[in-house]
Amino acid sequence: MKRRHFVGGLAAAATLSGCAKETANCADGGASQETFEWSCVTSWPPRFPGLGMAPENLAERVEAASAGRLKIKVYGGGEIVPAFEVFDAVSRGTVEMGHGASYYHKGKVDAAQFFTSIPFGMTNLELNGWLYYGGGMELWRELYEPFNLVPIPTGNTGVQMGGWFNKEINSVDDLKGLKMRIPGLGGEVLRRAGGTPVTLPGAEIFTALQTGSIDATEWVGPYNDASFGLHKAARYYYYPGWQEPGPGLETIIHKAAWESLPSDLQALLTTTCQAITADMAAEYTHGNATSLRQLKEDKNIEIRPFPAEVIALLRSIAADVVNELMATDPAAEKIGRAYFDYLRLASETSRISEKAYLDSREF
Ligand code: CA
Protein backbone atom coordinates (compact mmCIF):
# COMPACT_ATOMS: atom_id res chain seq x y z
CA MET A 1 0.00 0.00 0.00
CA LYS A 2 3.00 2.28 0.34
CA ARG A 3 2.72 3.59 -3.24
CA ARG A 4 -0.71 5.12 -2.76
CA HIS A 5 -0.73 8.91 -2.84
CA PHE A 6 -4.34 9.87 -3.32
CA VAL A 7 -4.10 13.32 -1.74
CA GLY A 8 -1.46 16.03 -1.98
CA GLY A 9 -2.72 18.71 0.39
CA LEU A 10 0.45 20.79 0.67
CA ALA A 11 1.03 20.86 -3.07
CA ALA A 12 -2.58 21.90 -3.55
CA ALA A 13 -2.19 24.88 -1.23
CA ALA A 14 1.03 25.98 -2.94
CA THR A 15 -0.52 25.75 -6.41
CA LEU A 16 -3.58 27.71 -5.34
CA SER A 17 -1.48 30.62 -4.05
CA GLY A 18 0.46 30.56 -7.34
CA CYS A 19 -2.83 30.75 -9.20
CA ALA A 20 -3.78 34.06 -7.63
CA LYS A 21 -0.80 35.72 -9.35
CA GLU A 22 -1.12 34.02 -12.72
CA THR A 23 -4.79 34.18 -13.47
CA ALA A 24 -4.21 33.12 -17.08
CA ASN A 25 -3.40 29.62 -15.79
CA CYS A 26 -6.53 29.48 -13.65
CA ALA A 27 -9.15 29.45 -16.37
CA ASP A 28 -10.84 26.46 -14.78
CA GLY A 29 -11.83 28.69 -11.85
CA GLY A 30 -12.89 26.23 -9.18
CA ALA A 31 -11.01 23.07 -10.27
CA SER A 32 -9.24 21.32 -7.42
CA GLN A 33 -5.47 21.76 -7.41
CA GLU A 34 -4.79 18.56 -5.47
CA THR A 35 -1.99 16.50 -6.96
CA PHE A 36 -2.00 12.73 -7.42
CA GLU A 37 0.94 10.34 -7.89
CA TRP A 38 -0.07 6.93 -9.13
CA SER A 39 1.71 3.72 -10.04
CA CYS A 40 0.64 1.76 -13.13
CA VAL A 41 1.69 -1.90 -13.42
CA THR A 42 1.53 -3.60 -16.82
CA SER A 43 1.67 -7.02 -18.49
CA TRP A 44 4.28 -5.88 -21.03
CA PRO A 45 8.05 -5.77 -21.32
CA PRO A 46 9.06 -2.20 -20.30
CA ARG A 47 8.53 0.30 -23.15
CA PHE A 48 7.77 -2.54 -25.61
CA PRO A 49 6.69 -1.08 -29.00
CA GLY A 50 2.94 -0.49 -29.15
CA LEU A 51 1.74 -2.52 -26.15
CA GLY A 52 4.19 -1.19 -23.59
CA MET A 53 4.36 2.33 -24.99
CA ALA A 54 0.58 2.81 -24.64
CA PRO A 55 0.64 3.30 -20.84
CA GLU A 56 3.86 5.35 -21.14
CA ASN A 57 2.24 7.67 -23.69
CA LEU A 58 -0.90 7.83 -21.57
CA ALA A 59 1.09 8.85 -18.48
CA GLU A 60 3.08 11.48 -20.36
CA ARG A 61 0.00 13.07 -21.94
CA VAL A 62 -2.05 13.07 -18.75
CA GLU A 63 0.76 14.67 -16.77
CA ALA A 64 1.27 17.38 -19.41
CA ALA A 65 -2.45 18.07 -19.88
CA SER A 66 -3.08 18.22 -16.13
CA ALA A 67 -0.07 20.51 -15.56
CA GLY A 68 1.41 17.86 -13.28
CA ARG A 69 -1.71 17.30 -11.14
CA LEU A 70 -1.87 13.61 -12.13
CA LYS A 71 1.50 11.89 -12.38
CA ILE A 72 1.58 8.19 -13.35
CA LYS A 73 4.71 6.04 -13.03
CA VAL A 74 4.59 3.02 -15.35
CA TYR A 75 6.18 -0.35 -14.50
CA GLY A 76 6.88 -3.22 -16.92
CA GLY A 77 5.63 -6.75 -16.19
CA GLY A 78 7.65 -8.23 -13.31
CA GLU A 79 9.17 -4.93 -12.16
CA ILE A 80 6.95 -4.66 -9.09
CA VAL A 81 4.12 -7.05 -10.00
CA PRO A 82 4.33 -10.19 -12.24
CA ALA A 83 2.94 -9.68 -15.77
CA PHE A 84 -0.13 -11.82 -15.20
CA GLU A 85 -0.97 -10.48 -11.70
CA VAL A 86 -1.91 -6.95 -12.74
CA PHE A 87 -5.63 -7.60 -12.13
CA ASP A 88 -5.10 -8.78 -8.53
CA ALA A 89 -2.65 -6.01 -7.65
CA VAL A 90 -5.03 -3.25 -8.79
CA SER A 91 -8.09 -5.02 -7.37
CA ARG A 92 -6.44 -5.15 -3.93
CA GLY A 93 -5.34 -1.51 -4.19
CA THR A 94 -1.63 -2.36 -4.00
CA VAL A 95 -1.30 0.08 -6.91
CA GLU A 96 -3.81 2.54 -8.33
CA MET A 97 -3.71 1.45 -11.96
CA GLY A 98 -2.82 -1.26 -14.46
CA HIS A 99 -2.57 -1.79 -18.22
CA GLY A 100 -2.95 -5.15 -19.93
CA ALA A 101 -5.50 -7.36 -21.66
CA SER A 102 -8.71 -8.65 -20.06
CA TYR A 103 -8.28 -12.18 -21.46
CA TYR A 104 -5.34 -12.66 -19.09
CA HIS A 105 -7.98 -12.86 -16.30
CA LYS A 106 -9.25 -16.20 -17.62
CA GLY A 107 -9.84 -18.43 -14.60
CA LYS A 108 -10.62 -15.43 -12.34
CA VAL A 109 -13.28 -13.73 -14.43
CA ASP A 110 -13.80 -15.78 -17.58
CA ALA A 111 -16.37 -13.43 -19.12
CA ALA A 112 -13.68 -10.72 -19.35
CA GLN A 113 -12.29 -12.47 -22.44
CA PHE A 114 -15.07 -10.92 -24.56
CA PHE A 115 -13.57 -7.48 -23.97
CA THR A 116 -10.18 -8.41 -25.50
CA SER A 117 -10.82 -10.75 -28.40
CA ILE A 118 -12.74 -13.84 -29.40
CA PRO A 119 -11.48 -16.18 -32.18
CA PHE A 120 -13.28 -15.22 -35.42
CA GLY A 121 -14.98 -12.38 -33.48
CA MET A 122 -15.02 -8.60 -33.76
CA THR A 123 -12.46 -6.38 -35.47
CA ASN A 124 -10.98 -3.30 -33.79
CA LEU A 125 -13.66 -1.03 -35.30
CA GLU A 126 -16.53 -3.35 -34.38
CA LEU A 127 -15.28 -3.83 -30.82
CA ASN A 128 -15.04 -0.08 -30.26
CA GLY A 129 -18.54 0.39 -31.72
CA TRP A 130 -19.86 -2.13 -29.19
CA LEU A 131 -17.91 -0.75 -26.22
CA TYR A 132 -18.54 2.97 -26.75
CA TYR A 133 -22.00 3.00 -28.35
CA GLY A 134 -23.48 -0.50 -28.21
CA GLY A 135 -23.66 -1.12 -24.45
CA GLY A 136 -20.34 -3.00 -24.09
CA MET A 137 -18.84 -0.58 -21.54
CA GLU A 138 -21.84 -0.86 -19.21
CA LEU A 139 -21.40 -4.66 -19.16
CA TRP A 140 -17.65 -4.35 -18.62
CA ARG A 141 -18.05 -1.94 -15.68
CA GLU A 142 -20.67 -4.19 -14.13
CA LEU A 143 -18.40 -7.24 -14.51
CA TYR A 144 -15.45 -5.53 -12.76
CA GLU A 145 -17.48 -3.80 -10.02
CA PRO A 146 -17.14 -6.69 -7.49
CA PHE A 147 -13.36 -6.51 -7.94
CA ASN A 148 -13.20 -2.78 -7.09
CA LEU A 149 -12.00 -2.05 -10.61
CA VAL A 150 -12.96 0.59 -13.15
CA PRO A 151 -12.09 -0.51 -16.73
CA ILE A 152 -11.26 1.93 -19.53
CA PRO A 153 -10.47 0.69 -23.09
CA THR A 154 -6.92 1.75 -24.00
CA GLY A 155 -5.52 0.50 -27.29
CA ASN A 156 -6.08 -2.26 -29.82
CA THR A 157 -3.48 -4.06 -31.94
CA GLY A 158 -5.84 -4.63 -34.91
CA VAL A 159 -5.95 -7.96 -36.75
CA GLN A 160 -3.01 -10.08 -35.66
CA MET A 161 -1.05 -12.61 -37.72
CA GLY A 162 -1.63 -16.37 -37.50
CA GLY A 163 1.97 -16.83 -36.41
CA TRP A 164 5.40 -18.23 -37.15
CA PHE A 165 5.70 -21.91 -38.04
CA ASN A 166 8.60 -24.28 -38.64
CA LYS A 167 6.17 -26.82 -40.13
CA GLU A 168 4.08 -26.25 -43.23
CA ILE A 169 0.33 -26.21 -42.68
CA ASN A 170 -1.13 -27.67 -45.89
CA SER A 171 -4.10 -29.50 -44.41
CA VAL A 172 -5.94 -30.03 -41.13
CA ASP A 173 -3.76 -33.08 -40.51
CA ASP A 174 -0.74 -30.81 -40.16
CA LEU A 175 -2.27 -29.34 -36.99
CA LYS A 176 -2.05 -32.74 -35.30
CA GLY A 177 0.83 -32.85 -32.85
CA LEU A 178 1.72 -29.21 -33.53
CA LYS A 179 3.26 -27.67 -30.42
CA MET A 180 2.43 -23.99 -30.52
CA ARG A 181 2.57 -21.03 -28.19
CA ILE A 182 -0.99 -19.73 -28.38
CA PRO A 183 -2.81 -18.56 -25.24
CA GLY A 184 -6.46 -18.38 -24.26
CA LEU A 185 -9.43 -19.50 -26.33
CA GLY A 186 -7.28 -19.78 -29.48
CA GLY A 187 -5.10 -22.31 -27.65
CA GLU A 188 -8.15 -24.36 -26.69
CA VAL A 189 -9.25 -24.35 -30.34
CA LEU A 190 -5.82 -25.65 -31.41
CA ARG A 191 -5.92 -28.35 -28.73
CA ARG A 192 -9.24 -29.66 -30.05
CA ALA A 193 -7.82 -29.62 -33.57
CA GLY A 194 -5.12 -32.04 -32.37
CA GLY A 195 -2.35 -29.59 -31.46
CA THR A 196 -0.61 -28.89 -28.16
CA PRO A 197 -1.04 -25.28 -27.07
CA VAL A 198 1.62 -23.75 -24.81
CA THR A 199 1.44 -20.51 -22.85
CA LEU A 200 4.71 -18.57 -22.62
CA PRO A 201 5.37 -14.95 -21.69
CA GLY A 202 6.54 -12.83 -24.64
CA ALA A 203 10.14 -12.73 -23.47
CA GLU A 204 10.54 -16.54 -23.71
CA ILE A 205 9.02 -17.07 -27.16
CA PHE A 206 12.09 -16.55 -29.34
CA THR A 207 14.29 -19.09 -27.55
CA ALA A 208 11.52 -21.68 -27.41
CA LEU A 209 10.99 -21.38 -31.17
CA GLN A 210 14.68 -21.30 -32.04
CA THR A 211 15.56 -24.35 -29.95
CA GLY A 212 12.62 -26.33 -31.35
CA SER A 213 10.88 -26.77 -28.01
CA ILE A 214 7.85 -25.37 -29.84
CA ASP A 215 7.00 -25.79 -33.56
CA ALA A 216 5.13 -22.53 -33.89
CA THR A 217 4.06 -19.36 -32.10
CA GLU A 218 1.65 -16.54 -32.50
CA TRP A 219 2.52 -13.20 -30.91
CA VAL A 220 1.04 -10.04 -32.48
CA GLY A 221 1.90 -8.99 -36.03
CA PRO A 222 4.86 -7.86 -38.16
CA TYR A 223 5.67 -4.79 -36.02
CA ASN A 224 5.93 -6.64 -32.68
CA ASP A 225 7.03 -10.02 -34.07
CA ALA A 226 10.01 -8.51 -35.88
CA SER A 227 11.09 -6.70 -32.72
CA PHE A 228 11.32 -10.11 -31.02
CA GLY A 229 13.28 -11.48 -34.03
CA LEU A 230 10.78 -14.31 -34.59
CA HIS A 231 11.57 -14.26 -38.33
CA LYS A 232 15.06 -15.50 -37.44
CA ALA A 233 13.62 -18.58 -35.73
CA ALA A 234 10.92 -19.77 -38.16
CA ARG A 235 10.38 -20.03 -41.92
CA TYR A 236 6.61 -19.75 -42.49
CA TYR A 237 4.55 -16.73 -41.49
CA TYR A 238 0.85 -17.59 -41.72
CA TYR A 239 -2.17 -15.29 -41.84
CA PRO A 240 -4.75 -14.25 -40.80
CA GLY A 241 -4.75 -14.08 -37.00
CA TRP A 242 -8.08 -15.87 -36.58
CA GLN A 243 -7.30 -16.25 -32.87
CA GLU A 244 -7.13 -12.49 -32.21
CA PRO A 245 -8.87 -10.43 -34.88
CA GLY A 246 -8.77 -7.07 -33.04
CA PRO A 247 -7.83 -7.44 -29.40
CA GLY A 248 -8.65 -4.46 -27.21
CA LEU A 249 -6.39 -3.55 -24.30
CA GLU A 250 -7.51 -2.18 -20.96
CA THR A 251 -6.61 0.32 -18.30
CA ILE A 252 -7.92 -0.77 -14.91
CA ILE A 253 -8.15 1.64 -11.97
CA HIS A 254 -8.75 0.80 -8.33
CA LYS A 255 -12.20 2.13 -7.44
CA ALA A 256 -11.11 4.20 -4.43
CA ALA A 257 -8.32 5.81 -6.45
CA TRP A 258 -10.78 6.59 -9.26
CA GLU A 259 -13.28 8.14 -6.85
CA SER A 260 -10.55 10.25 -5.25
CA LEU A 261 -9.96 12.06 -8.58
CA PRO A 262 -11.83 15.31 -9.21
CA SER A 263 -14.20 15.06 -12.18
CA ASP A 264 -11.96 17.06 -14.52
CA LEU A 265 -9.07 14.59 -14.01
CA GLN A 266 -11.44 11.64 -14.48
CA ALA A 267 -12.56 13.20 -17.78
CA LEU A 268 -8.96 13.88 -18.78
CA LEU A 269 -7.94 10.29 -18.06
CA THR A 270 -10.84 8.69 -19.99
CA THR A 271 -10.40 11.06 -22.93
CA THR A 272 -6.67 10.38 -23.05
CA CYS A 273 -7.27 6.60 -22.96
CA GLN A 274 -9.52 7.01 -26.00
CA ALA A 275 -6.81 9.09 -27.69
CA ILE A 276 -4.30 6.29 -27.01
CA THR A 277 -6.66 3.81 -28.71
CA ALA A 278 -6.71 5.98 -31.83
CA ASP A 279 -2.96 6.54 -31.61
CA MET A 280 -2.19 2.84 -31.26
CA ALA A 281 -4.20 2.07 -34.40
CA ALA A 282 -2.02 4.57 -36.26
CA GLU A 283 1.19 3.21 -34.70
CA TYR A 284 0.32 -0.39 -35.65
CA THR A 285 -0.80 0.58 -39.15
CA HIS A 286 2.56 2.20 -39.76
CA GLY A 287 4.70 -0.26 -37.79
CA ASN A 288 3.11 -3.33 -39.41
CA ALA A 289 3.42 -1.85 -42.90
CA THR A 290 7.11 -1.00 -42.62
CA SER A 291 7.98 -4.24 -40.81
CA LEU A 292 6.09 -6.40 -43.33
CA ARG A 293 7.96 -4.73 -46.20
CA GLN A 294 11.25 -5.72 -44.56
CA LEU A 295 10.07 -9.27 -43.88
CA LYS A 296 9.04 -9.66 -47.52
CA GLU A 297 12.57 -8.85 -48.61
CA ASP A 298 13.97 -11.68 -46.47
CA LYS A 299 14.48 -14.72 -48.74
CA ASN A 300 14.37 -17.10 -45.77
CA ILE A 301 10.73 -16.33 -45.07
CA GLU A 302 7.52 -17.42 -46.78
CA ILE A 303 4.36 -15.46 -45.98
CA ARG A 304 1.28 -17.62 -46.60
CA PRO A 305 -2.46 -17.78 -45.97
CA PHE A 306 -3.80 -20.73 -43.97
CA PRO A 307 -5.53 -23.22 -46.32
CA ALA A 308 -9.31 -22.70 -46.48
CA GLU A 309 -10.03 -26.12 -44.93
CA VAL A 310 -7.84 -25.27 -41.93
CA ILE A 311 -9.69 -21.97 -41.37
CA ALA A 312 -13.06 -23.73 -41.74
CA LEU A 313 -12.13 -26.34 -39.13
CA LEU A 314 -10.76 -23.78 -36.67
CA ARG A 315 -13.87 -21.58 -37.11
CA SER A 316 -16.19 -24.48 -36.38
CA ILE A 317 -14.23 -25.54 -33.28
CA ALA A 318 -14.07 -21.91 -32.09
CA ALA A 319 -17.87 -21.72 -32.10
CA ASP A 320 -18.03 -24.79 -29.82
CA VAL A 321 -15.37 -23.42 -27.48
CA VAL A 322 -17.11 -20.05 -27.11
CA ASN A 323 -20.53 -21.69 -26.62
CA GLU A 324 -19.07 -23.81 -23.84
CA LEU A 325 -17.53 -20.71 -22.23
CA MET A 326 -20.96 -19.05 -22.28
CA ALA A 327 -22.51 -22.12 -20.68
CA THR A 328 -20.02 -22.04 -17.79
CA ASP A 329 -21.30 -18.95 -15.96
CA PRO A 330 -24.16 -16.43 -16.15
CA ALA A 331 -21.85 -13.44 -16.72
CA ALA A 332 -20.20 -15.13 -19.72
CA GLU A 333 -23.61 -15.97 -21.12
CA LYS A 334 -25.00 -12.44 -20.67
CA ILE A 335 -21.91 -10.73 -22.10
CA GLY A 336 -21.46 -13.34 -24.82
CA ARG A 337 -25.03 -12.90 -26.03
CA ALA A 338 -24.58 -9.12 -26.19
CA TYR A 339 -21.23 -9.60 -27.97
CA PHE A 340 -22.65 -11.86 -30.68
CA ASP A 341 -25.81 -9.77 -31.12
CA TYR A 342 -23.54 -6.81 -31.81
CA LEU A 343 -21.20 -8.79 -34.05
CA ARG A 344 -24.17 -9.90 -36.18
CA LEU A 345 -25.37 -6.29 -36.37
CA ALA A 346 -21.99 -4.69 -37.15
CA SER A 347 -20.84 -7.37 -39.59
CA GLU A 348 -23.71 -6.52 -41.96
CA THR A 349 -22.07 -3.14 -42.50
CA SER A 350 -18.45 -4.37 -42.31
CA ARG A 351 -19.15 -6.79 -45.16
CA ILE A 352 -20.39 -4.10 -47.58
CA SER A 353 -17.98 -1.40 -46.43
CA GLU A 354 -14.48 -2.36 -45.18
CA LYS A 355 -14.39 -5.82 -46.74
CA ALA A 356 -16.06 -4.88 -50.04
CA TYR A 357 -13.92 -1.81 -50.45
CA LEU A 358 -10.60 -3.56 -49.68
CA ASP A 359 -11.52 -6.30 -52.14
CA SER A 360 -12.40 -3.73 -54.79
CA ARG A 361 -9.37 -1.54 -54.84
CA GLU A 362 -6.22 -1.95 -56.84
CA PHE A 363 -3.71 -1.68 -53.95
CA1 CA B 1 -1.50 -12.75 -29.96
Image (cartoon, grey):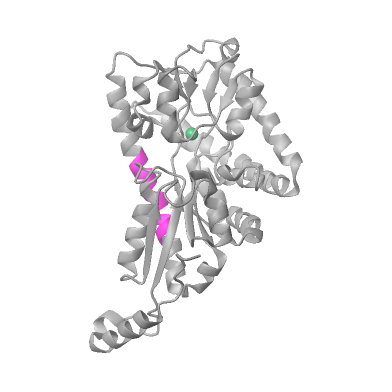
Majority secondary structure of magenta residues? helix
Q: Do we see residue 140 in this rendering?
A: yes
Out of 73 and 357, give the one closest to the viewer. 73
Give the image location of residue 98, x and y in percent. 48, 55
Q: Is residue 283 magenta?
A: yes
Q: Is residue 353 magenta?
A: no
Left or right of 68 in this view: 76:
right
Residue at the image position 43 percent from the left and 60 percent from the top: 39
Out of 288 and 257, give the one closest to the viewer. 257
Out of 161 and 225, give the one closest to the viewer. 225
The image quarter in which residue 291 lies: top left
Out of 46 and 314, give the one closest to the viewer. 46
Residue at the image position 67 percent from the left and 44 percent from the top: 336
Q: Is residue 321 above or below residue 276?
A: above
Q: Do we see residue 359 in this rendering?
A: no
The image quarter in which residue 282 lies: top left
Q: Is residue 351 above or below residue 43?
A: above
Residue at the image position 75 percent from the left and 45 percent from the top: 329
The image quarter in which residue 296 lies: top left
Left or right of 227 in this view: 358:
right
Q: Is residue 209 above or below residue 265?
A: above
Q: How many marks?
A: 0
| Residue at the front extreme of this rendering | 2
Left or right of 116 in this view: 271:
left
Give the image location of residue 285, x and y in percent. 35, 38
Give the image location of residue 115, x and y in percent. 57, 46
Q: Quadrant of the C terminus?
A: top left
Question: Which residues are the magenta region?
Answer: 272-284
